[in-house]
Amino acid sequence: MADAQRRELPGHIAAALAGAGGPADSAGQPWAGRDLTSAAAPTHQFDDDDGSADPGYAAAVAALRSGSGTEAGVVAALATARVFVPVVAALAEESEGAGGLQADKQADMALVTLKAPDGRRALPAFSSAAALEAWHPQARPVAVFAPRAALSAVAEDAQLMVLDPGADFTFVVRRPALWALARQQPWVPSYEDPAVAEAAAGVRLDASEIESVTVHRATGTGSVDACGRRVDGGGPGPELRIVLQVRDGLDAAALQRLVDRAQQHWARNEVFAERVDSLDLSVQRAQG
């Protein structure tokens, strides 16, 4: 569900709006219903930008969809890609003016945010102006580099950034990748991160009943395109699967206590807190 928040816009978004003439262009024409795909469509502070998808990002997504690319490759391409974030007019509340008279309502500009199925806030961003217009014709496209869009997401308390919602293919940037983009740092998926594997295995120090700990890529990283084809990446998660092999002979209550202890151990771990968005935990009894 889309939600236009009337909070103060991040500085770089406000500056982009101001530089482009606010909710209307320099001729006073409103943005609602404008053709954003034409050669004459303004793209804000990006000179000679025709509003099409960044070639590097488009190539990384094409590789991911064909099976030759990776999630990390898509996020790495975003580090230098221009994207569009949607901004809409949000009607401010009436305020009391001089003499007790009601002041006129005013339209402020607000970022659009989404609510993910798990209740978390997400910032939509679009690889092209055409994709944004198809999703929300009344939204004003603000062109920014993806790391600045990630900063906007953090400013809006969003834990996800959703690229091209409603388009042929949607890519979800999960929280650790979002933070890495905002910091302009490289991102390693948790299921490929040796530090995460080491942190996961550290739970054995707290629980002698655990015989082994292995980490795997969870099925939640997968997504489906508009044609129903499975894509091995871009999903909202969970992205990390941990398998605990435990000593045989534990009853159900003991197993539950063990799971609770493991989850508490990982919750206290700084590596887990920063690099793992969500996980799928599996408990198996050791054989033999």
Image: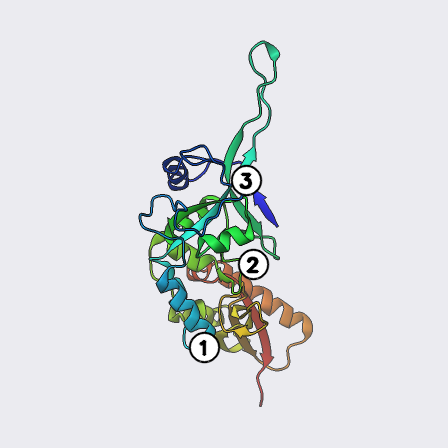
In the picture, the disc for residue 166 is 2
**Is residue 171 toward the left or the right of residue 79 in the image?**
right
Element at badge 2?
A: loop
Q: Position of residue 282 (x, y in %)?
A: 58, 74
Residue 68 in view of the camera? yes
Residue in front for this viewpoint, 285 or 239: 239
Which amino acid type is marked by label 1? Gly
Q: The residue tagged with tag 1: helix, strand or loop?
A: loop
Q: Which labelled disc corresponds to residue 5?
A: 3
- At horizontal 59% and vertical 79% (from top left) the residue drawn is 284
Q: Amino acid at mark 3?
A: Gln
> Label 2 is placed on what type of residue?
Gly
Mark 2 or mark 3: which comes first in sequence?
Answer: 3
Which of the pair 106/239 is nearer the observer? 106
Q: Earlier in the sequence, mark 1 or mark 3?
A: 3
Few, some or many residues within 10 Å of mark 3 (<14, 14–19, 20+): some
Q: Which residue occupies 55% across, 64% down?
A: 263
Q: How far apart are labels 1 and 3 at the CA level?
A: 38 Å
Q: Position of residue 152 (x, y in %)?
A: 43, 46
Task: Identify the mark at residue 67; answer none if there is no mark.
Answer: 1
